[in-house]
């Protein structure tokens, strides 16, 4: 994980072997890039994000269904003074 010297808190919660919850809070007054790495067993996953507007499906590199290796290194730009919750779980129907 890289926070680029910004005031950002990150917490990871594992729910079993296949599901993860990630909490990211940006305490800065400007957007903060955060490089994340989540280790998961091989398989296809979906990434959902909860913000103050509700749950949203997140695409990485234009893909809605992600292999585990795509989640080993990805970047998010977290809005200023905001918190986001991510849910990573096996893709439906996979």
Image (cartoon, grey):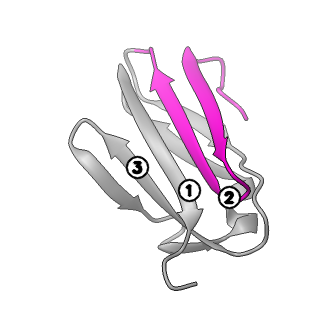
User: Which circle marks residue 49 in the picture?
Assistant: 3
| 62 within the magenta span | no
Q: Position of residue 30 (x, y in %)?
A: 39, 22
Q: Position of residue 78 (x, y in %)?
A: 44, 34
Instruction: Tell me the residue that label 2 is attached to.
Output: 71
- Taking the spot 35% from the left edge, 19% from the top edge, the residue there is 81
- Taking the spot 72% from the left edge, 46% from the top edge, the residue there is 37
Q: Residues within 10 Å of mark 3 (few under 14, many from 20)?
A: some
Is 86 displayed left or right of 19 in the figure?
Answer: left
Looking at the rendering, in which quadrant would you find the C terminus? bottom right
The numbered mark, 1 or 2, whose residue comes first in the sequence reads 2
Residue 83 position by quadrant: top left
Instruction: Tell me the residue that label 1 is attached to.
Output: 88
Contact check, label 1 and label 2, Cβ < 8 Å: yes
| 2 within the magenta span | yes
- Taking the spot 68% from the left edge, 58% from the top edge, the residue there is 71
Judged from the image, the secondary structure of the residue bearing numbered disc 1 is strand
Where is 86 relative to 60, above or below?
above
The stretch in magenta equals: 1-28
Q: CA distance from mark 1 to mark 2?
A: 9 Å
Q: Nearer the viewer, residue 17 or 47?
A: 17
The numbered mark, 1 or 3, whose residue comes first in the sequence reads 3
Contact check, label 2 and label 3, Cβ < 8 Å: no
Q: Residues within 10 Å of mark 2 (few under 14, many from 20)?
A: some
State the residue lying farthest toward the left: 53
Q: Position of residue 1 (x, y in %)?
A: 73, 35
Judged from the image, the secondary structure of the residue bearing numbered disc 2 is helix
The numbered mark, 2 or 3, whose residue comes first in the sequence reads 3
Q: Nearer the viewer, residue 76 or 15?
A: 15
Q: Nearer the viewer, residue 24 or 31?
A: 24
Is 39 displayed left or right of 56 in the figure?
Answer: right
């Amino acid at each position: 994980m890289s926070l680029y010297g910004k005031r950002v808190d990150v917490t990871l919660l594992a729910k079993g072997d296949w599901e993860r919850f990630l909490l990211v809070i940006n305490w800065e007054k400007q957007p903060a890039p955060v490089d994340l790495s989540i280790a998961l067993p091989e398989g296809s996953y979906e990434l959902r994000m909860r913000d103050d507007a509700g749950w949203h499906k997140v695409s990485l590199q234009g893909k809605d269904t992600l292999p585990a290796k795509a989640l080993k290194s990805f970047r998010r730009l977290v809005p200023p003074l905001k918190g986001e919750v991510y849910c990573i779980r096996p893709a439906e129907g996979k």
